[in-house]
Structures are given as C-alpha cells and as structure tokens.
Amino acid sequence: MKRLPLIAIILAAVALVGEAFIFASRRGDDDDIRREAIRADYRVYAPPLPDSLTFCGERVPLDDYVVREALDREVVTNMYYQSSTLLILKRSTRFFPTIERILRQEGVPDDMKYLCVIESGLQNVTSPAGASGYWQFMKATGQRYGLEINDEVDMRAHLEASTHAACRYLKDLRRRFGGWTEAAAAYNMGENGLEKRLNQQRQRSYYQLLLNRETTRYVHRILALKLIMENPEDYGYHLRSCDRYAEVACREVTLEGRDVDLVQFAIDNGTTYKSLRTLNPWLTSATLKNKEGKRYKLKIKS
C-alpha cells in the first residue's frame, strides 16, 4: 500500500479540525437563535392566586404558607394540564345545571359541585379500587345511601340519583365533623380515617392535619378547579359558547315488565340501543330481567 506524504496527512487533519470548528460555531449560533426565539415567543406564567378564598362559605387560611403553596401546586398542575381541564370546562355546561339544581334542593353548598369534578372529571368512570360513577361511590357506600347496585342496574352511573345520594352523604359527614371542608376530606379518605387522624393529632380543622398525600392534595384540588372554572380566562382558557357541550334534550319514558330486550325497547321508542345506553349508563346489560317488576324512568333523546 502506498503511504501518503506527511504533508497530506497534516493538511487533511487541519481540514477536519476546521470543519469541526465551523460545525460547532454554527451549532452555537443555532443554539443562540433558539434561546432568543424561546425568550421572545414562549411564555410559562405563574398563575395568580387570590388574597382570600372560601369553600362552602368557610374561610381558606391562605395566610398559612403551607396551605397557600399547596393550593398553588394544584392551580399550576390543573392550569397546565390543558387537555383535561379544557374538557372539564366543556362538560360543565352539560352537567352543572342538574348538579346545581339538586345541591340547592338538598341544602348543600354549590361549591360541592367541584368535588364531583375532581372525583370523575364529570364522567361515568370506574376507579381501580371499584369506585364508580360521577361521584365515585364505592358499592357499599352507594347502597347505604339508597342507590340500587346489582348485575343489571348501577345507579352510581345515574346523575340525578347519585347526586342526591352524594348530598345525603356529605350532609351526614358535615354533621359528624362540623364543617364542609372536613366533610370533603372525609369523602375522600373515609369518615373513620379522618376521625382517627383528628383524634391522634388533637385538631378539628382539615388545614391543621398531617394526612396522607392524596387527602392532603384533595381539598386543594377542589379549590384549584373552583378558581379555574369560575374565572377560566384568568388561567388561559378561552371558550366560545359553541365550544361548550350543551345539555341533551330528552323525553322521559317508563320501562317496566320482566325480561325486557333493551335493543328492541330502544327501537320501539324511536331510538338506538347505543343512544339508550349512552343516556342511561346505569343500565349495565342488553336485557333487564327485572325480577322484582320495578318501574324505571329512562331518558330518550328528543
């Protein structure tokens, strides 16, 4: 093999070093351009917090730095979890009118609708632990507050029925613990769990308790959604009326009898099985045996 002259090797090496220097310089220039573009075009804002705040008419002690920073965390998290928060804002106009009406009827503060928001995102969902529906009732608690739950019917998925049940439960919790804030905390961790922590730590206020991570964040998440949903534009959310989901216009029909074929029932009532189940998600199968011969009110899209 013919060996290259030493001068050729040196020149090649110099050329490579030069190219590397030029590449590094260009990359450095590109980095500077990108930094300037980020400074000019990209903004991440710390969200505003109010000087004072109440929940269900009860004062939130924002002068306590622990409480204020806990609230700040939840506002930041939900403000910048844009897809989830935006969809909640869209759904609220469909579900809040019904929830608000029932809260008024039951004598429960309007702010409790935000508890429903953080429990389910205003959706019929089931948690890994088995809590289900808009208000995320466990089966035993739902049955204790009058919800029918069996292989054919699960009233945890019935907006009106589950909201009435949640109101009764929250009122019982408030009577036990003396405040709506503590009632909300007990709704999350269970009344016995909260009672135990209150007695152990010799406190009566949620804000003075050292609790598990989930319940520590729970009420602050409710407060964060209250702030964002009451003043969405303050937190960067701009929705037109047409962006929000409207209530679905429905008529009510009565279902009775045994061994009802719900597919045929839907067709007989001028709708589809899909629409029937979507508007009545508390029905859990295609056939309702209804051995006890109960009468049910179903929603049919008008």
Image (cartoon, rainbow, N blue to C red):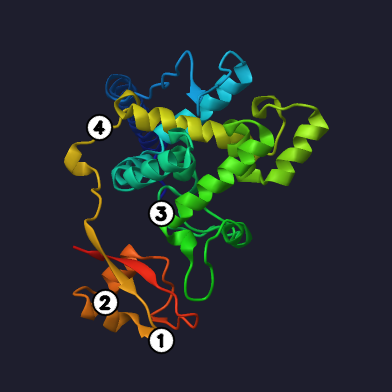
Asked whether the residues under the numbered discs 2 and 1 touch, taking CB atoms below 8 Å apart as contact, a structural biologist would say no
* Viewport quadrant of the C terminus: bottom left
- Check disc 1: other Cα within 10 Å, few if <14, some if 14-19, many if 20+: few
Verify CB contact (< 8 Å) between mark 1 and mark 4.
no
Residue 261's place in the image compared with 202, above or below, is below
Instruction: Classify 190 as above or below 213.
Output: below
> Residue at point 29% right, 32% down?
237
Q: Are marks 3 and 1 in contact (CB under 8 Å)?
A: no
- Which residue is the site of mark 2? 266
Q: Residues within 10 Å of mark 4 (few under 14, many from 20)?
A: few
Q: Secondary structure at mark 3?
A: helix
What residue would you read off at disc 1? 259
**Label 3 Cα crowd, 10 Å radius (few <14 / some 14-19 / many 20+):** some
Quadrant of res 160: bottom left
Residue 159 percent coordinates (x, y): 41, 55
Circle 1 sits in a helix, a strand or a loop, which is it? loop
Q: Nearer the viewer, mark 2 or mark 4?
A: 2
| Disc 3 residue type (three-letter) | Glu
Label located before the other in sequence (1 or 4): 4
Residue 51: give x, y in percent of width and height.
Answer: 47, 13
User: As shown in the figure, which amino acid type bears the numbered disc 4?
Assistant: His
**Which quadrant does the N terminus fall into?**
bottom left
Q: CA distance from mark 2 to mark 3?
A: 21 Å
Q: Residue at x 21, y 43 (%)?
A: 243
The residue type indicated by label 2 comes to Ala
Alpha carbons under labels 2 and 1: distance apart = 14 Å
Choose between 63 and 185: the one closer to the eye: 185
